[in-house]
Image (spheres, grey):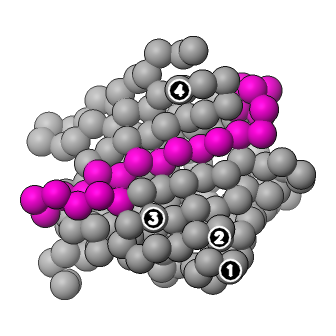
């Protein structure tokens, strides 16, 4: 197994831990400075999600994002990159949506046997521990995701989420 790694946060910021826990599993953990209600909304409301999700340094743009965030609902993200003529589509369905505590969705763009992502939100003392668990269909699928760099942006994404939660919390 690959050893876990941590992002180097800005002073006063939390750490993001990214760990390959088995041949097919990747687990990302971060404590976000905000209540579970706001953190969950940032993940589950499309108009909020699109404001923080894409790591700014990667050159990607979120062209569109549609989501019916409920058990049985579907989502579709369309991403663009200057080096690609065609946008990249990511889509799937929500297997479970439990407000303020759990989201589970499929990643169906790879065809049969795509990854399943589970995100849990656990609030304690005004902060929320977020755990992202990705279960890939095979060792090769996770190897490919890691080799492509698609698993490397978690630290930056969570930094952006932390900054965004400050804005949301000020408006709440």
The first of marks 3 and 1 along the sequence is 1
The first of marks 4 and 1 along the sequence is 4
* Mark 4 lies on residue: 21
Disc on res. 94: 2
Disc on res. 119: none
Task: Tell me the quarter of the picture where residue 66 sits.
Answer: bottom right
> Where are the magenta residues, as a range?
121-143
Residue 154 left/right relative to 66: left
Between the residue at mark 3 and the residue at mark 4, the CA separation in whole angstroms equals: 20 Å
Residue 161 makes an appearance in the image: no
Q: Secondary structure at mark 3?
A: strand
Between the residue at mark 3 and the residue at mark 1, the CA separation in whole angstroms equals: 15 Å
Q: Between 45 and 87, which is closer to the camera in this rendering?
A: 45
Task: Tell me the quarter of the picture where residue 39 sits.
Answer: bottom left
Q: Secondary structure at mark 2?
A: strand
Q: Secondary structure at mark 4?
A: loop
- Asked if the residues shown at circle 2 and circle 4 are in contact, with their CB atoms under 8 angstroms apart, the answer is no
* Mark 3 lies on residue: 102
Between the residue at mark 2 and the residue at mark 3, the CA separation in whole angstroms equals: 11 Å
* Mark 1 lies on residue: 73
Residue 113 left/right relative to 50: right
Between the residue at mark 1 and the residue at mark 2, the CA separation in whole angstroms equals: 5 Å
Query: What is the crowding at mark 4: few (fewer than 14 residues within 10 Å), some, or many (at least 20)?
Result: some
The first of marks 2 and 4 along the sequence is 4
Q: Residue at x 53, y 78 (%)?
A: 46
Q: Residue furthest right?
A: 112
Query: What is the crowding at mark 3: few (fewer than 14 residues within 10 Å), some, or many (at least 20)?
Result: some
What x and y, as percent, mark residue 47? 49, 81
Q: Between 59 and 109, which is closer to the camera in this rendering?
A: 109
The first of marks 1 and 2 along the sequence is 1
The first of marks 2 and 3 along the sequence is 2
């Amino acid at each position: 197994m690959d050893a876990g790694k941590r992002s180097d946060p800005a002073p006063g910021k939390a750490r993001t831990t990214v760990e390959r826990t088995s041949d097919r599993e990747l687990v990302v953990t971060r404590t976000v400075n905000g209540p579970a209600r706001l953190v969950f909304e940032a993940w589950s409301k499309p108009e909020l999600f699109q404001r923080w999700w894409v790591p700014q340094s990667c050159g990607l743009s979120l062209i569109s994002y549609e989501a019916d965030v409920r058990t049985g609902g579907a989502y579709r993200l369309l991403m663009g990159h200057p080096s690609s003529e065609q946008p990249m589509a990511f889509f799937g369905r929500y297997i479970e949506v439990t407000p303020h505590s759990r989201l589970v969705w499929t990643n169906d763009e790879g065809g049969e046997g795509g990854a399943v992502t589970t995100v849990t939100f656990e609030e304690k003392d005004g902060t929320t521990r977020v755990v992202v668990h990705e279960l890939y269909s095979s060792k090769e699928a996770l190897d490919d995701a890691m080799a492509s760099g698609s698993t490397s942006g978690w630290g930056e994404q969570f930094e952006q989420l932390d900054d965004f939660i400050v804005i949301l919390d000020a408006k709440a």
